[in-house]
Image: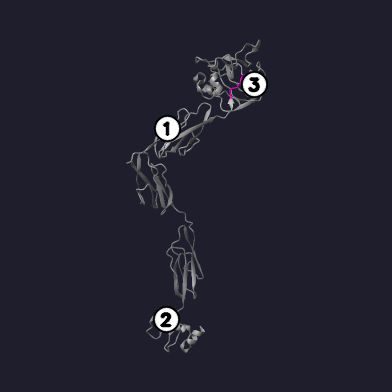
């Protein structure tokens, strides 16, 4: 600056140079003439005018849309400011800065310009005013339609008509709004300030629907759901009544289907664009057992349906109570995995543990269910009188006698054990016994139907 001052005629300073330049730019044609805060005097001197107004800068900081911009103002003038529209989800809070506002809580306000530059800041906060929402109802026969719910006015609402019903195709949307694309199953609209119902319309498909085969594999009685279905169609399947002694477990498939509930015998899935096989799986009902003489015995007679097995009098209720009646050949393979038809020797051990052939019947019989001689059921064996079936198909002695096959045979016949409620003496092995207390043995034709009590392997 000192060098510049030395090169300037008459010792004038930089301010004088700036003044002359300013006057030239302003094309001052009258003397005296003001140019900024400087004045060109009649003597040709350029100097800052002590009477000229002072100009200072106002800067406005605001996140609002359309806020007034800053500017230059003379000290003492009134400055109008506006914070702009609050950002989404917010509301104006107040003004802050090194001035005194006429109303710091109003987004439109004023202040008197001080003799210095100032910065004023518009502050915003989360909008505490509850947003009013209006209901959108999507009416559609399509599967998996979406978009229903509550929306604020001005929100963008996305809607989907879902998969068209079998044999149909999406046509258009109708309703009291303007759709972005009314001919598209997926579209949007701007939410008005009122509830609206939009309807997805369908029409007969111009392309014949391709159908794929569903195969239901189930051992249940009365299983349903097999047939031909179009891709996207809802398929309802039923596993049927579980086989005797079993209960439904789950559905499985290797064909890429997702079940609504794979653990329910009644369920659904959406048909893919390929043939599928779905399998109903069953499992044995939980098995209760009792240990007698070191051998685990089922606590109930077997009730698993097999060929050449029957319910007494062909009544399912009798199977529930007494179990099924099996031929000897079927009895040998009827027990589930981990169990088997006990041998004569295993039955002998049971009877011996329970008090011997003369008394074991009393200890092994159920406390109820026998017509004339219930037992004490001391070991939890709970023997019941299920009767028997002859080779000719006749049923006899339910409530009076219980017969059980063993895995042993003699003379071409199957070995058996039995208990009775018939009163009177029983001549057996050279002795005389009370028939109501004993457990007796013998043989019978293999095509006779007797009960089965399984023992653990």
The quadrant in which residue 131 appears is bottom left
Please indicate, yes or no, whether residue 363 appears anywhere in the rendered image: no
Q: Which residues are magenta?
A: 340-348
CA–CA distance between discs 1 and 3? Answer: 49 Å
Instruction: Choose the circle earlier in sequence order: 2 or 1.
Output: 2
Q: Residue furthest front?
A: 411
CA–CA distance between discs 2 and 1? Answer: 96 Å
Single out the mark in the foreground, 2 or 3: 3
Please indicate, yes or no, whether residue 13 appears anywhere in the rendered image: yes
Q: Is residue 182 above or below residue 445?
A: below
The residue indicated by pointer 2 is 22
Does residue 271 show up magenta in the picture? no
Q: Is residue 298 above or below residue 178?
A: above
The residue indicated by pointer 3 is 350
Instruction: Choose the circle earlier in sequence order: 2 or 3.
Output: 2
**Residue 194: mark in rendering:** none
Give x and y (percent) for residue 49.
45, 83
Single out the mark in the foreground, 2 or 1: 1
Residue located at (42% from left, 34% from top): 214
Identify the secondary structure beneath mark 3: helix
Contact? badges 2 and 1 (CB < 8 Å): no
The residue indicated by pointer 1 is 226
Give x and y (percent) for residue 376.
64, 21
Q: Residues within 10 Å of mark 2 (few under 14, many from 20)?
A: some
């Amino acid at each position: 600056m000192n060098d510049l001052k030395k090169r300037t005629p008459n010792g004038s300073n930089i301010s004088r140079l700036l003044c002359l330049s300013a006057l030239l730019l302003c094309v001052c044609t009258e003397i005296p003439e003001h140019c900024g805060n400087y004045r060109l005097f009649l003597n040709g001197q350029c100097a800052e005018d002590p009477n000229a107004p002072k100009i200072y800068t106002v800067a406005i900081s605001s996140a609002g849309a359309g806020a007034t911009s800053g500017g230059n103002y003379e000290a003492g003038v009134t400055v109008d400011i506006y914070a702009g529209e609050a950002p989404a989800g917010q509301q104006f809070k107040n003004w802050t800065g090194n001035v005194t506002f006429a109303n710091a809580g109003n987004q439109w306000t004023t202040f008197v310009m001080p003799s210095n530059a100032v910065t004023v800041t518009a502050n915003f906060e989360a909008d505490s005013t509850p947003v009013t929402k209006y209901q959108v109802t999507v009416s559609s026969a399509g599967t998996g339609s979406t978009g229903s719910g509550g929306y604020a006015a001005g929100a963008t609402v996305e809607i989907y008509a879902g998969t068209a019903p079998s044999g149909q195709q999406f046509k258009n949307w109708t309703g009291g709004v303007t759709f972005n694309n009314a001919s598209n199953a997926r579209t949007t609209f701007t939410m008005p300030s009122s509830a609206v119902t939009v309807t997805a319309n369908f029409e007969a498909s111009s392309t014949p629907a391709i159908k794929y085969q569903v195969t239901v594999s189930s051992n249940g009685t009365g299983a349903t759901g097999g047939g031909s279905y179009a891709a996207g169609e809802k398929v309802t399947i039923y596993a049927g009544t579980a086989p005797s002694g079993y209960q439904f477990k789950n559905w499985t498939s290797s064909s890429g289907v997702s079940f609504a509930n794979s653990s329910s015998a009644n369920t659904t899935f959406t048909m893919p664009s390929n043939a599928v096989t779905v399998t109903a799986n069953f499992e044995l009902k939980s098995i209760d057992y009792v240990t007698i003489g070191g051998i685990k015995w089922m606590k109930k007679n077997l009730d698993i349906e097999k060929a050449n097995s029957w319910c007494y009098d062909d009544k399912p209720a009798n199977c529930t109570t007494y179990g099924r009646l099996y031929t000897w050949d079927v009895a040998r393979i009827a027990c589930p995995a981990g169990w088997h038809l006990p041998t004569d020797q295993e039955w002998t051990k049971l009877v011996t543990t329970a008090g011997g052939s003369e008394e074991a019947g009393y200890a092994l019989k159920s406390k109820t269910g026998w017509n004339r001689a219930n037992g004490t059921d001391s070991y939890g064996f709970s023997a019941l009188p299920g009767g028997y079936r002859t080779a000719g198909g006749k049923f006899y002695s339910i409530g009076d006698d219980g017969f059980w096959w063993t895995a042993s045979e003699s003379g071409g016949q199957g070995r058996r054990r039995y208990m009775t409620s018939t009163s009177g003496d029983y001549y057996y092995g050279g002795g005389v016994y009370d028939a109501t207390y004993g457990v007796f043995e013998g043989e019978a034709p293999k095509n006779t139907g007797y009960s089965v009590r399984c023992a653990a392997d």
